[in-house]
Image (cartoon, grey):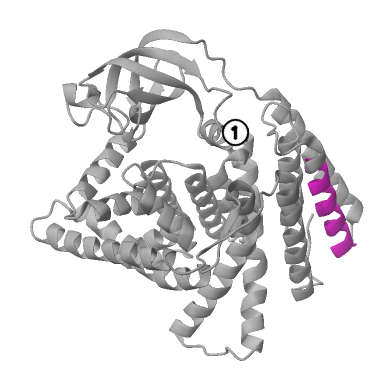
Amino acid sequence: MQLPLLLPAMGWALGLATAGPFLSSALSPWVGAAFGLVLLVVAAGVLLRRWPLRWLALSAAAALGWAWGRQQAPPTVSAGRIATQATVLERASPTRYGVMSVAQLDSPALTVTLFADSGAPSRSNRHALDPGARLRLCGRLRPLADSLPEGYRRSLEARGISATLRVYELQALDEAGPFHLRLRAAGLDRFDRLPHHSAAALGRALLLGDRSGLDADARRRFARSGAAHVLAISGAHLMLLLGALAWLLPRLRANRFGPHRLLWAALLSVVLIGYGAVAGGSPAVLRAVVMAVLALVGQALFRPVVGLNLLAATALLLTAVHPPILYDLGFQLSVAAVAGILLLAPAGDHWLMRMGWTSMHPLARQARSLLVATVAATLFTAPVLWAAFAQLPTWFLVSNALLVPIASVATLVGFVYLPLADVPLLGSAIGWALDALLLALDAATAWCAALPGAVLTLPPLGGCWAALLLAGLTAFGLLLHHRSAPGDSRWV
């Protein structure tokens, strides 16, 4: 297996993690050094051929990552009252301080968290704080406070948010915002037509990444059941979208390796990028979209597509463009889960077949794949969740076996519902079916969360130990890969 990008990606992440401007207090420089040393020893010990080149690749990438991280600095924010125009990026959600949204200011060019009084949107119109809306506003601008919890502040910086704006006066403008934001607002409005409010909020989160309508109890249920990833737009959503498009365009699908392969790849890439933009463009969404586009381009050019290479290239690209994304919890969980599946799932599937699970029936294969993917992803994300929340779900196998199929069907029906919601009768019928599926998903999640011992509470885990645990899991995965193909493992 050719993995020329894996070690450089590891070195680059190590360099960024130890760079000053974005260094978290939970990840001191010696932690990054220990993490890099473990990976270095693993790589040199597992694969002895051309080991000096591997040392050189990792060391050079680490040096470049450190140098690039040192050059980055958060934008300078001057506190004070401002009057400006802005474009709303996210739908407003209620808080104890009023309503909160995210907006892009025209001047100064900043992305800010917007706080307004609860009655402010209604003074103009109820869509004043919907995505794509243009506003004229006056308020007090403040940089992100150091008193904020570090994890929360890092997540805001990873999304490009560098300040907060307390709005005193707000006026909706007649100008049209960017097309993808207006399309996102239209999609959110379509979900608002579903009969039940809880189903509408769940549908917006499931297909458009908008969690503003989910209350604290709903979020807690998904976290306790070990199925919070169901609400995260990931590669599974993109696979379902691509499958639906391939079913609608069978002629183009049949020529995906023929003379029209470039057209096929270009069309699907545009669809994926557009969906990523409409779905909010969160770090986890960006990871899934960039990785899928790279895979499509590789297939169209008849290049071997290796999952670990794609993951490494995606991580390199995203962290180079926006280094703070490295500290986003969603990005960390997304990369860790995909790495676990790519490293452990093939060996796990082979082990289950050796143990007697040899049925080739499609349902049996899907169940086996779901089982090994769930275990692999949970194993690799466990250190991140432990460090972030000091707890781990215990019934994740049961919850994923129950919730993933329901969520997949609901996602497919949702993709059909969004473009057909305005069609008389048909749109209503699809909406009722989607509403029933989302209510079933909510009820199943509540049942899983209520199981005895649903959450295992653990002592706090520092970033040091989380990094070392991930290093050990990575070493284990690399050993499995080397044992499966010892003569064909090329890293550089």
Label 1 CA crowd tier, 10 Å (few <14, some 14–19, many 20+): some
Instruction: Give me the residue at 66% from left, 49% from top.
Output: 460
Of residues 421 and 407, the one nearer the viewer is 407
Q: Is residue 134 above or below residue 56?
A: above
Instruction: Give me the residue at 58% from left, 73% from top.
Output: 372
The location of residue 11, given as percent across then percent down, is 77, 44
Can you identify the residue that label 1 sits on? 150
Magenta-tinted stretch: 32-48
Q: Quadrant of the N terminus?
A: bottom right
The location of residue 295, given as percent across then percent down, is 55, 56
Decide whether residue 39 is among the magenta residues.
Answer: yes
Instruction: Give me the residue at 40% from left, 60% from top.
Output: 242
Tell me the kind of residue under disc 1. Glu
Of residues 2 and 339, the one nearer the viewer is 339
Of residues 210 and 197, the one nearer the viewer is 197
Q: Is residue 260 visible?
A: no
Q: Is residue 204 visible?
A: yes
Q: Quadrant of the C terminus?
A: bottom right
Based on the displayed image, in which of its 4 quarters is residue 252 positioned? bottom left
Decide whether residue 185 is among the magenta residues.
Answer: no
